[in-house]
Image (spheres, rainbow, N blue to C red):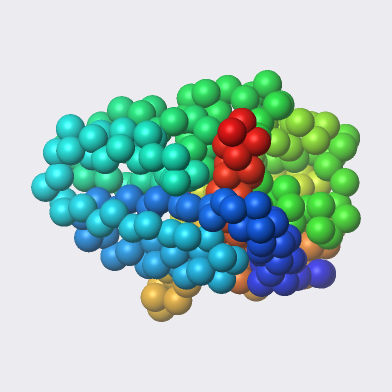
Amino acid sequence: MKLIDGKVISAHIKQQVKAQVDELKAKGTEPCLAVIIVGDDFASRTYVNNKKRTCEEVGIKSLEFALPAETTQEELLELVEKLNADDNVNGILCQLPIPKHIDEKVILNAIKPEKDVDAFHPVNAGHIMIGDCVLKPCTPAGIMEMLKYEGIDVAGKNCVVIGRSNIVGKPMAMLLLAASGTVTVCHSRTQNLTEITRSADILVAAVGKAKFVTADMVKEGAVVIDVGMNRDEDGKRCGDVDFEAVKDKASHITPVPGGVGLMTVAMLMQNTVTAAESQNNRG
Ligand code: GUN
């Protein structure tokens, strides 16, 4: 078994991004990411801090807009519009979840597609479907980088994605398909799940349930990618894959923590620079 090390691969991506940032700065542009957080969700606060720290690491300017939980939809929309119109802001990200009285879809759809560094806007989702995207959703894009770094060719492989979310499962399926994989998407209503996952050469678990993928669900020699971020019965961080049981069966596997999560943030940096570059070129 080979461990796919998110720390090493994300460092490689961040190094590339830093070089791009330096080049942009030499031309007089400082890439800038605006991060919006509404309310005081503890996990969101951790993620946002992590994103800001990584911005600093690669030389991207970050602006934080921390709004109280009582913020109205109109107030949040007003902020998004202000950031859309600000030429100094290249990327806009609204950390999810947002409070229930605000319609998430309305907010995500209001972010200018060229500043949508999460690539959640329907226009960007459409580009992913067609296969000509500029901004790719960070987690699936990070997974593709991991496969590339490890020299794992997707073409012709049986790829099974467990999970059909708009953030991970669906765009992951599209990127694997664009790389000529034969893709199956499984979800909570899937019948004979084990039978399907056992056919996977590349298995991506994005379920949100601790240790959901057990050894009997994995083919000998499969590549196993774990998107999960859960707590186990002892409160320890763990993924969607039962790592200890699966690691001896897999040819490659990502750990949690230290795997896909690190890639998500690195790809957010990449998207911010890509956005800055394309906005700059358009002048
Ligand atoms: N909440 C959980 N994952 C994400 C993400 O990738 N982007 C944003 N904006 N919020 C999230």
For the point 40% across and 51% down, which residue is it? 34
Looking at the image, residue 105 lies above or below residue 33: above
From this viewpoint, is residue 76 visible?
A: yes
Mark count: 0
* Residue in the foreground of this view, choosing between 57 and 173: 57
Q: Residue at x 70, y 27 (%)?
A: 132
- The x, y position of residue 191, in whole percent, is 58, 33
Q: Nearer the viewer, residue 147 or 93?
A: 93
Q: Is residue 260 visible?
A: no
* Quadrant containing the C terminus in the rendered view: top right
Residue 11, position as x, y percentages in the image: 69, 69
Quarter occupied by the N terminus: bottom right
Q: Position of residue 86 (x, y in %)?
A: 39, 40
Q: Residue 7 is drawn in which quadrant?
A: bottom right
In the image, 1 versus 115, the foreground residue is: 115
Residue 99 placement (x, y as % from top left):
21, 45
Residue situated furthest left in the rendering: 70
What residue sits 47% from the left and 60% below the top?
61
Vertical arrangement, residue 92 with respect to residue 128, above or below: below
Q: Nearer the viewer, residue 119 or 216?
A: 119
Q: Is residue 182 left or right of residue 114?
A: right
What residue appears at the point 37 percent right and 57 percent down from the top-left corner?
A: 63
Position of residue 207 in the picture relative to residue 213 (left or right):
left
Q: Quadrant of residue 190?
A: top right
